[in-house]
Structures are given as structure tokens and as C-alpha cells.
Amino acid sequence: MLGNLGENLTNTMKKLAGMAVIDKKTIKEVVKDIQRALIQSDVNIQLVLKLSKTIEDRALNEKPPKGITPREHVITIVYEEMVNLLGEKSHELNIDDKPFKIMFLGLQGSGKTTTIGKLARFLQKKGYSPAIVSTDTWRPAAYEQLRQLTEELNISLYGDPNNKDALDLAEKGLKKFKNQKIIIFDTAGRHKDEADLLEEMENLSSIIDPNEAILVIDGTIGQQAHDQANAFAKTTDIGSIIVTKLDGSAKGGGALSAVAEVGAPIKFIGTGERLDDFEVFDPERFISRLLGMGDIKTLIEKAEEVIDEDVAAETMNAMLSGKFTIKDMKNQFDMMGKMGPVQQVMNMVPGIGAKIPKEARKMTEGKIDKYKIIMSSMSIYEMENPKVIKKSRITRIARGAGVRNEEVKELLKYFNSTKKAMKGIGKRGGGGGINRLVSQFMK
Ligand code: GDP
């Protein structure tokens, strides 16, 4: 659906989920990718700029809520702002009055007749049996198209191909179906000129007095949908919009965002020529799918190893006994990712606070992410026997992690000072505190 837009956005989100470090540079890169994808889909440039500024501002300035990593936070911001681009979550049709009158509007070729069939089918599945009135006196085939459709669906139709008075047809249709629960009115999509068409819609609207006026817009016209929706909105109070032909349309994103700007909710979308190619439109679900959020969630879950009670206890014991290895440090980092900044975790152990090594105080989440990447370039043997990591191994690890040799050395230095500090705490008998820390992990 939506041409390449979904694919481009999903790839951007996957890239974001896989980024080792989330900083100003990477956020700008992600925003650039999103901009490119949206502009290709014909989303209005002003909207794109506004959206990217909001994403960038929020990603750079908002602190991630507790328990959320910076990466998840940026993904959430992109998701939320994209949902905002599509407007509020709308309510489904609220069929209360009897008869509940639905008036369809839309230019010829927009997919109006097909969509009437789709909505009728949708209502049938909900247990209704809608009747249809044809008032299109301009397109000779309109009545015939509806006749076939209603026959297929086995529902009632009123129309008269010989009557050229749309208002009269509407009045007669109303009378004929006054005892039906739902009446759907088809209208013309073409006239002598646009002004005449809009005038006819206004007159029809006052006769039909619809409970719901539904505007059908062709999704392939992109951001032009904005002016089209505005023109129709002047003739009657548009209660919902249906954007059609979103299957494979390269400009669908532009149409959806342009329509959302007009203020009338998009309640359904058309995704193909068949009667079942029709969906209730839910901005959250739609964006979720467009961004490939299902995939992203599993990616994030994979990226952060789940805290395991045994691993936590093992790591703590290693810390106390002085047998602390790089593998334990890696476990420690993974757990910290879940629990919050290093210092906060250390502070939970009574008596340690003041003794946190100077390097640990300076640890940022960005640095932890980088250290994790370096550690994943080490072999298990190296992690368990850090002493063997000398010159050539340092070069290989650095190359594998895409960092400088100095950064690997910095990690080794950090490891050694942490190990020393841990040993000291163990000797001084901080056991009670450590146990408390272990129990914190298990909550
Ligand atoms: P109307 O003139 O507005 O009544 O438009 P029609 O209902 O006759 O549709 C015009 C063309 O668009 C037809 O060929 C339909 O099959 C096609 N169409 C309508 N909705 C969709 C859709 O959601 N996807 C695709 N691919 N084609 C559609």
C-alpha cells in the first residue's frame, strides 16, 4: 500500500532501531530520511518541515520517561508525530436516526460508486440492509452501474435514468425508502462546470438533510486532495472522508495528510477494486503498519537482552569475589539499560555511592551503547580472560566494532578500575547491600 512510502519509512525505523548511538547527528539523519520519504509521497512541504522540526525538537530536548531507552523514545516520538499528521482518531458511523441518511459526494472517477458498494457491504456485515438512491443525472452509466451492484449485494435501489432532475429523484427516493433503516444517496460527480456541481450538492444536501455526508477522494491525486476537500466542505457539513485507491498509490501519503488538514475525519480507506478492499481508518494502526512497528518492537527486544535472575545473581557474585570479567560487565550494562543510569544503580547499594570510580560517574548511555558494541566484537574467551586482550586483538576488536583503538583501550581501562572497586566493596563486606541490589533486579 502507498507505493514505496511504507517501505521507506519501515527501513528508516529499522535503521533507527539498529543505531548504536542516538545523538544529534543520528537524529538529524533519521529526520532527513523521513522528510525524503514523505516528500516523495507528495506530502505538502510545509507539513513535512513542521513535522520534522517537531520530531527533531522533541527528540533532542525531551528526556525519555523512566524505563524507556533513548532509542525507543525517538521511535515513539516519530510514531506519535506521524499519527498527528493524519488527524484525530475518528468515530465510526453512529447509526442512530431512522432513516439514517448518508449522502455521498465526490468527483467522477474518484471511486464513488465502487465505494458506495463497499460501504453497503460493510453495513450488511453489521446486520443492516441499506437502500440506495441514484441521483446522478449526468453520467448515463451511473444508474446501470448501481443496478448491477445492488443486484450483486441483493439490496434495494431507486433511480430513473429518464428523470433529469436530481432534486426530484432525491425527494422520491426519500419517500420510497422512508421506512428503511439506512438510505445511501449517490450524487453526480460531474456537471457543466464545477460551480454548477457544487450548487447541486448544496441543494441536494438541503433536501436530503443527511445524517452523514461522506466525501470520496481519489488518493492518487496527492496533496491536491486538500483543495478538493475544501471545495466540497463548503457545500455541506462533511462528516467523513473516504480516500480511495491507496493500494500502490505513490501519492497516498500526500492525499491522507492533505485531507486530515481540512478537519473532516477520514473514516475509511479504499485499497483495491473489489468490494472487500475497504478498511476502517485508524490513524494509530495505520501508522504502526506503515512504520513496520511490529518488526521494530521485536528488533528492540532483541537488542536489549532481557534481565534474567540467574544472570543478575551471577554477575553480582562475580563482582564480590573479584572474579569480575568483561562478560560480567556486559551483563551489568544490559541490566543497567533496564534500570537507569549507572550512578543511580550504584547508589542503590548502601556504602558504594561515594566510591564509584571516576570513570563510572562519567558513563553516559551513549557510551554504554558504544561499549556494548565493542564488547560484542570480542570473543567469549577474550571477555572471560581480559588479560589476553593485547595489541593485535585490540586492533581486531576496534575494526570489528568500527571504533578507534583508543576507544577499546578506554573500555579496558574502565573495566580494570571497576573490577578494582568491586573487589574493595566485596572485602569490606557490602554483601547485605549487594543482595538488596540483586533483589531490586528481580522486581
Ligand atoms: P465514480 O466515477 O466516482 O463513481 O468511480 P467508480 O466507482 O466508477 O471508480 C472509478 C475506477 O476506480 C474504477 O475502475 C474502480 O474500479 C476504480 N477504483 C475505485 N476504488 C478503488 C480502489 O480503492 N483501488 C483501486 N485500485 N481502484 C479503485
Image (cartoon, grey):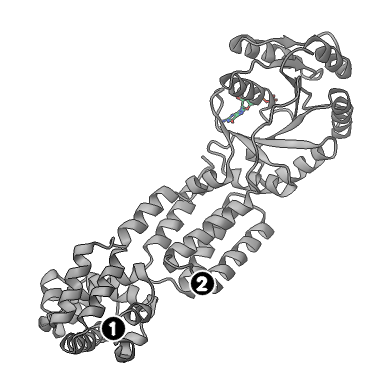
Looking at the rendering, which quadrant does residue 300 occupy? bottom left
| Residue 336 in view in this figure | yes
Q: Quadrant of residue 320?
A: bottom left
Which of the numbered marks, if any, corresponds to residue 63?
2
Instruction: Identify the residue shown where x is 61% and y is 9%.
Output: 154
In the rendered structure, which amino acid carries the disc numbered 1? Glu
Residue shown at the point (47%, 60%) measured from the top left: 75
371 shown above or below 34: below
Q: CA distance from mark 2 to mark 1?
A: 27 Å
Residue 7 screen position, x and y as percent: 46, 48
**Residue at the image point whose x is 31% and y is 69% from the top:** 440
At numbered mark 1, what does the secondary structure look like: helix, strand or loop? helix
Q: Residues within 10 Å of mark 1 (few under 14, many from 20)?
A: some
SS of the residue at dot 2? loop
Q: Is residue 36 left or right of residue 148?
A: left
Location of ligand 1 given as a quarter of the image: top right
Please tell me the numbered disc located at residue 407. 1
Outermost residue to the front: 432
**What amino acid does circle 2 point to?**
Lys
